[in-house]
Image (cartoon, coloured by chain):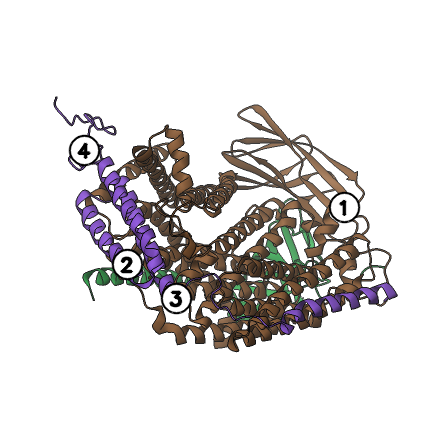
Amino acid sequence: MTAIDIAIICLMAVCVVVGVGEPLVRRLAYRPHGREGNNETERLLLQKEMLYGAIRDLDFDFQTGKVDQKDYAELRQQLEREAVQILRQLDAVDPLVAFDNELEQQVLALRQRSTSTSCGSEREACSSCGTPLEEDENFCPFCGHALRLS
Amino acid sequence: MSDIGGAALKFAFVVAIYAVIIALLGVRLKRQEMIRSAERATYGVFGLVTIAMVALLYALLAHDFRLQYVASVSSRAMPTFYVIAALWGGQEGSMLLWLWLLAMYSALVVVQNRHRNRELMPYVISTLMTTTLLFLAMLVIVEDPFRLLPHEPRDGQGLNPLLQNPLMVIHPPNLYLGFVGFAVPFAFAIGALASGRLDTQWIRSIRRWTLVAWLFLGVGILLGGQWAYVELGWGGYWAWDPVENASFMPWLTGTAFLHSVMIQEKKGMLKVWNMVLVILTYALSIFGTFLTRSGVIASVHAFAQSSLGPYFLLYLAGILVIAITLLVKRLPQLRSDHRLESVVSRESSFLFNNLFFVGIMFAVLWGTMFPIISEAVRGVKISVAAPFFNQVNIPLGLGLLFLSGVCPLIAWRKASGRNLRRNFLYPLSLSFVITAALYTLGIRHVVALISFAICLFVFGTIVLEFYRGTRARRATSGGTIWQAFVSLIRRNRRRYGGYIVHFGVVLIFVGITGSSAYQIEQNVVLRPGENARVGAFTLQYDDLTRMIESTHEAFIAKLTVGRDGKYLTTLYPEKRLYFAQNQPTTEVALRTSLFEDLYIIMAGFEPSKTVTFKVFVNPLVFWMWMGGLVMVMGTVIAIWPERRPPGPGRQHTAGQVEMTALQGTN
Amino acid sequence: MSKQHVKLSIGVVVIVTSVAYLIFSGATGSTMYFLTVPEVQQKLTALKGEPIRVAGKVTEDLIDWDVRNLSLAFVIGDGQSRIPVRYKGVKPDMFQTGVDVIVEGRIGHDGVLAASVLMTSCPSKYQEEKSPTL
């Protein structure tokens, strides 16, 4: 072991001890939550996320033809009810969230309208192949079945 | 330099012990400065282990043969590329690499979560540092990479030529990145259990870590298979060898976890099951490492009996006891948020797929451990050969493949019967038609037909999914087909990345089916000038030449290959004798095409230059490797971070919940 | 339990039972005793015709390697015990006197183990202390 080796080893030891020990000589406030909000808001926000995710999935499943109109309407209503409930709970817990929620409620409603529009509230699906349709189509874009007699 | 390395490891050992203790003290006594110190200690361990790695690498490159490790894995004649790779070519070095990756991951995790998961992090640090301690203990006490020889030899032994191959160079690091990677989800699981913060937050935090670990492990397994195929010369790529199984098992439970985690994220169900899977995956990783290094089960990878076994077992027992105790303690808090709405739903198909994965894992575990169990129970070792594994896993694997085709067709929560039946129709028809065509073309092997049929079915469902998704996307936001397609994948990375991964799996099944069911194996004895026919190929043996290279002596046979009367290629199977080792190696001559591989080895030759060739024709192997690539692509798409969308509600959840707002789906 | 739960449980039970059945039937098919050479010599008469797996070393006895027919004849030993082996296949590169091997096969009436599998271990990857050449 050369002198340089010993020097470097000592340097290593000193750096480690200083780096690791330095926080101990300071006084730091105990922050178990970092930038997180309080527990209850956290939980409700997560639940809201889950519900929104479920609504998104449902919309997509409907658009890709895995859920029929009846099931879709039923499930979506159920999910929307739960979402509104959560939003109300969030309002009660944290008033600052209320404004955001209002915006989100509006977006939620808008999106539903757009989904049901693109899926045709009048004519939900092609009677021949079952593809979801837009409102003003004469022929089914998928199978070519005539929809309207003009 | 080596003294510095040795000292660095010993320091790291001390600092790791400190980190474990101070992190736990800090969270118990609610002292932030202690937790901060533990974080620093984690960085410190990483720094020190890096110094040790650098020291060993330096010793290798400087040909410092005073070190026993350097002398055993490298030599002066070895190309520099392989000298560097020799860093993980032997027991001590590869353990150091394992340790370094673990230390790096630990430091990364700490940095990444500087402002998040604060309640969990002290436990995460403790857990990760405990694992680091395991390896540090083994390196410092038993397998010192810096151990010196009594006197310095003039030259080293050099790395076994079988390992001097690019595939073998990247195979261990890949595997380790996988094994070590699973330590992070495990640490978070322990953190969630210990701190009581059992909501979905910890699962979201580890999602990418799990995917990355899973990806590397999968790639590592495929690389190992490819190396065995290309280098070992027995014509196959997987032997259900205990060491192979050891890496496969955590991959299986890891895949199960990747799927069931989605259910917890969406519906808050299967919380206990996910915990079990995470713990199991990590335990299997450690167990796998133990199997590989302790020599406790005989295998072609069999290494000499080492004394590392007790360390691994003790650690494994310790973490299992702690994990299970914590899990049982928190059981009441791990109740499901929702119930299952319908058996015909994506949730339940995920559940079934989990059962298949765990079933296969259990079968592999059973077969691998049977010798030890039977010895303990009946006093006599009974071993289980490859046919067992194939007999059990082929049906299960095919069942799982079929499920992966069915699942995308089913909606979350509840699928409508009529829609489901209609969705089944197209892929099933495709499968039926093409399978019938295959049958008429002469494919009669029953299992192969079933396998191809299922592969086609799954392929059909994937195409259908992309088609419908693109069309739905176009319906909502217009644009060209291509734009809709790209935007569809962008907004649903996890789902469509996943479908691409499934497609990769289909390709792998195609490759396995072809090469297993229709392999041709033939021994051919030829004198110079003679030719023979194997399958559709004609092989003309021209000559055997002897060459001397710097590191080895080679006997090279020249084979002119023709097909259907036309010249195809020339192949050169070899037998080499490396001067540093005392045994010959066989170099496989391989010609790959999309349709089949022509695989030739020189089994031996006589002084008269009569050569015995062993010739294999392996159909469809190319698609296995292709499938692996596709899987990587799909995983990368799934991992790729979403662009953080602007919008309301962000302040409360910055960095926490992945606010994808009203964008993508899974 | 709701109707859905019942259906689910049935599905789970079916899968678990199938897995168990597959494992059981597979295990009874392809198992073999894993023995050391002395153990085989002890029970030689009982083991004739049984599929077995034996671990031992390649002894200094004559190794006959017939390249044309790919037939390798050698003796596997452990201490004083010895068993002659005839393996049909490619001679593994690492095969030589003194190497640890594992063979799978059956012992015929002539006392020779007809091996279908021959494995040599990779000694140089992870090994115990070995003195390098000087």
Q: What is the chain identity of the residue bearing mark 1?
A: B
Q: Are marks 2 and 1 on the same chain?
A: no
On the rendered image, what quadrant is the N terminus of chain B found in? bottom right
**Which tint was used for chain C?**
green
Name the amino acid, label 1. Answer: Pro
What residue sits 71% from the left and 55% below the top? B87
Q: Are marks 4 and 3 on the same chain?
A: yes
Name the amino acid, label 4. Answer: Cys
Residue C15 visible from this viewpoint: yes
Mark 2 and mark 1 in contact? Answer it, CB < 8 Å: no
**Which tint was used for chain A?**
purple
Q: CA distance from mark 3 to mark 2?
A: 15 Å
Give the residue pinned by disc 2: A86
Give the residue pinned by disc 4: A126
Residue B602 percent coordinates (x, y):
66, 42
Q: Nearer the viewer, residue A123 or B580?
A: A123
Give the residue pinned by disc 1: B79
Look at discs 4 and 3 and give the one toward the viewer: 3
Q: Are marks 4 and 2 on the same chain?
A: yes
Q: CA distance from mark 2 to mark 1?
A: 65 Å
Give the residue pinned by disc 3: A39
Q: Residue furthest left?
A: A149
Q: Quadrant of residue B524?
A: top right
Q: Quadrant of residue B450?
A: top left
